[in-house]
Image (cartoon, grey):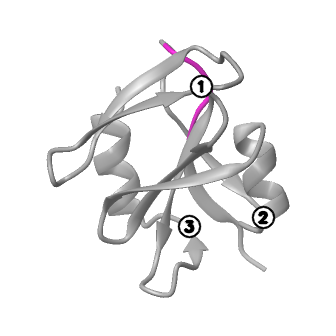
Amino acid sequence: MSKQMIIKVTEAGALPLLSEVPKLDLRTMQSLVGGLIQPVQLEPGITLWCDEEAKLKGIPLNRHVEDVWGNVWDINGPFFLCGDNEEGDAFGLTVVQATKWLALLQ
């Protein structure tokens, strides 16, 4: 099984990191964000996953992230980006997707 390429952002001020995970199942996704996962679609085929309870837990703001429709999202705590499809399946980013979003998250 090949590894899945994701962009991981651990905390405010930290640079985004290109990372690989063995699979993008629920357990892996929850461990990456530190809690229950919440999807935020940034553009067709790209989803940001964060802890849906991060604000309630008092975890500090990590970043403001803008989607392709102009919506700005306040993301608290760690998050990661991966690819997705119309059925909602999560999978690794392509090189083009990773390059684009690494630059946007700087």
Work out whether mark 3 precedes mark 2 in sequence or the reverse, and give the earlier one: 2
Question: Residue 73: x, y in percent?
Answer: 35, 36
Between the residue at mark 3 and the residue at mark 2, the CA separation in whole angstroms equals: 14 Å
Where is residue 92? Give x, y as percent.
Answer: 56, 67
The kind of residue on which mark 1 rests is: Lys
Mark 3 residue element: loop
Above or below: residue 48 compared with residue 66: below
Local SS, label 2? helix
The residue carrying mark 2 is 26
- Residue 20 location, x and y as percent? 67, 54
Is tag 1's residue or tag 2's residue first in the polypeptide sequence? 2
- Identify the residue shown where x is 56% and y is 45%: 80
Q: Label 2 sits on what residue type?
A: Leu
Answer with the quarter of the image where residue 21 lies.
bottom right
At horizontal 58% and vertical 59% (from top left) the residue drawn is: 5
Instruction: Check disc 3 and report the residue beneath it.
Output: 92
